């Protein structure tokens, strides 16, 4: 049995009403899975636990009622607390071809010819698409995490394959410095 991994799933936001409901600033793609009634979340950096009594969507926001936060005053005092859950490191997302950040960070990035390009050090989440931060010998490079540019993720081998796209990992200035042609 492998050790669990601590995963941030949300941050306690603003109070909603007077009965202790709170808006959650989500940090997970699976809120229905992580905020299921009866689930117990932990406050990051502490042993404090919060039990979910109810979770519902309201105007595009997830509202949660925790057993331990009985009223608006308690919720306001808890605002900003980071919520974490311990998960099995082998747990996979429900959808095929989806990955958790923790699975991608640390993977070796390889070029189409098989040579090592660098290592994935971060996943950046943007509204349009996610980006992989790849640490290369020349510094960090951002690569859109789309199948056209990252056609293969092999968790068992510990690699991501990058498409053969000119300039994907190089700066134009670096190409000129290396004797390349300026365009």
Image: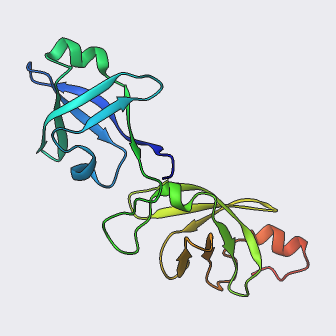
- Image: 95 above or below 63: below
Taking the spot 57% from the left edge, 62% from the top edge, the residue there is: 132
In the picture, measured across the screen, residue 63 lies left or right of residue 49, that is left
In the picture, measured across the screen, residue 141 lies left or right of residue 127, that is right
Q: Quadrant of residue 115?
A: bottom right
**Of all residues shown, which one is farthest toward the top?**
73
**Of all residues shown, which one is farthest toward the front?**
1
Q: Quadrant of residue 171?
A: bottom right
- Image: 147 above or below 170: below
| Residue 44 place in picture, x, y as percent | 44, 29
Taking the spot 63% from the left edge, 64% from the top edge, the residue there is: 107
In the picture, measured across the screen, residue 75 lies left or right of residue 16, that is right
Q: Nearer the viewer, residue 124 or 38?
A: 38
Taking the spot 19% from the left edge, 42% from the top edge, the residue there is: 62
| Residue 114 place in picture, x, y as percent | 73, 84
| Residue 156 place in picture, x, y as percent | 57, 72
In the rendered image, the quadrant that contains the C terminus is bottom right
Q: Nearer the viewer, residue 100 or 24?
A: 100
- Image: 115 above or below 41: below
| Residue 104 place in picture, x, y as percent | 55, 62
What colour scheme governs how the chains and residues are painted in the rendered image of this protein? rainbow
Please count the marks in the image.
0
In the picture, measured across the screen, residue 87 lies left or right of residue 15, that is right
Q: Nearer the viewer, residue 17 or 2?
A: 2
């Amino acid at each position: 049995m492998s050790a669990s991994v601590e995963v941030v799933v949300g941050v306690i936001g603003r109070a909603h009403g007077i009965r202790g409901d709170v808006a959650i600033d989500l940090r997970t793609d699976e809120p229905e899975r992580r905020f299921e009634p009866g689930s117990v979340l932990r406050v990051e950096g502490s042993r404090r636990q919060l039990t979910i009594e109810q979770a519902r969507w309201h105007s595009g926001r997830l509202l949660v009622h925790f057993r331990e936060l009985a009223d608006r005053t308690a919720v306001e005092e808890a605002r900003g607390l980071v919520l974490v859950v311990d998960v099995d490191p082998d747990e996979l997302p429900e959808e095929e071809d989806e990955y958790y950040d923790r699975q991608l960070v640390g993977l070796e990035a390889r070029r189409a010819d098989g040579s090592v390009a660098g290592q994935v050090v971060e996943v950046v989440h943007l509204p349009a698409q996610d980006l992989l931060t790849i640490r290369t010998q020349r510094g960090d490079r951002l690569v859109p995490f789309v199948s056209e540019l990252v056609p293969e993720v092999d968790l068992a081998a510990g690699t991501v394959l990058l498409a053969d796209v000119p300039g994907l990992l190089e700066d134009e200035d670096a190409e000129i410095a290396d004797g390349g042609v300026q365009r």
